[in-house]
Image (cartoon, grey):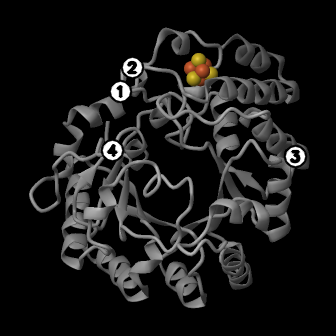
Amino acid sequence: MVCTSFIIKVTSRCNLNCSYCYMFNKGDTTFQSKPKIMLRETAILALNKIYSYSMKHKISEIDVVLHGGEPLLSGKEWVSWFLEKSEELKPANLRVAYCIQTNGTLLDNEWISIFKSRSVNIGISLDGEREIHDQNRIDHNGNGSYEKVTKGIDLLLKSGYKKWGVLVVADPEISGEDVYNHLLDLGVKNMDFLWPSYNHDNPPKKSEKSLAEYYISVFKAWYSDKNVEINIRWFSNVIRLLLSGNSRLDCVGPVPLNQVVIETDGSIEPADMLRTCRDGLTRLSLNVLENNIDELIQTDLFQKCLQNQELLPLNCKSCSIYKVCGGGYMADRWKTETGFSNSSVHCADLYDVITYIRYQVVEDLNDSNIKYQIIQE
Ligand code: SF4
């Protein structure tokens, strides 16, 4: 099994201080000891390691994701240089899809031109209407960021650039349908609703409303719109799995977690979200200065990521929606005593949402054989 997704931590700091941020506010303090911006020498080493790994394993296509903190804090010159250097160093037969995950507050036309020039896919974080978004997504002085983010979205719409979308962190206390409608009003076509990051040591607060209600209300609105221009990534992947296709996400389906992260100081680590489990869990003393990507893959933690499905308990393996759910995202399965050998902390909600989608999709299938096949699975 090979890794095709490489996350480059361009910056280790952020101009926002979101209450739920897994980088800064979920117990992991790794960021304090890292350089604020990745040195160019480190970036070159990182790119060389990624490309030699890709050549060695005969990989034809990879994702390189610029991440942070807030990656735009590294500045336009740095990002332009990085994209150019990457193109210069990459093997001719390797296709690289570039992505950037930003809070959107610093976007301007110059940034958009830089991303357009290399077809960079832009992911922007926005949680809904102003009052909702500004509850959590605040700067270091406590000011909301909605105004700045929506200005950035407006610039993207005016630019005509199409390769961008919005990521929302789901919140059971609010109406998912209202958030969905607000994104449509803003002109967003590609969106995703992320399951909030919790685990069995740190479970979500008890709430009158459930995450399942949130997701089902978004699904109902989206599915009844029947607008093929609007894509919600998590739902599309669930439907693809229901129709016996493959998941393209590492948070849905019985899939390995095979992301490689390179930190600003050159540390090589497994998927970022695992840092929410325990302070320092992802620190493996590997660095692009001395180590290569294969050495990360051989570590015990990375092997657990690749084989995370084998760790699942029997209740997942025998669950009627296991082939779609896959036990939930690996980080959400963590418990100190049992590690990742648990079903997701969101199990009940995942079950309700996926079961709901399954019956809606099955209802709509005309072919009774396919219908039968899906029901039997
Ligand atoms: S719904 Fe729960 S039991 Fe079923 S596969 Fe998902 S996490 Fe496991």
Q: Residue 3, can we see it?
A: yes
The residue furthest right is: 224
Residue that label 3 marks: 221
Residue occupying the point 30% across, 41% down: 281
Q: Which quarter of the rendered image does ligand 1 occupy?
A: top right
- Residue 193 locus on image (x, y percent): 67, 49
Sort mark 3 into few (<14), some (14-19) or many (20+) by Cα contacts within 10 Å. some
Q: Are marks 1 and 2 in contact (CB under 8 Å)?
A: yes
- What mark, if any, has residue 279 been given in the picture? 4
Residue 322, visible in the rendered structure: no
Q: CA distance from mark 1 to mark 2?
A: 7 Å
At horizontal 35% and vertical 63% (from top left) the residue drawn is 8
Image side of residue 114 versus residue 298, left or right = right
Give the residue pinned by disc 1. 307
The three-letter code of the residue at mark 3 reads Ala
Q: Earlier in the sequence, mark 1 or mark 3?
A: 3
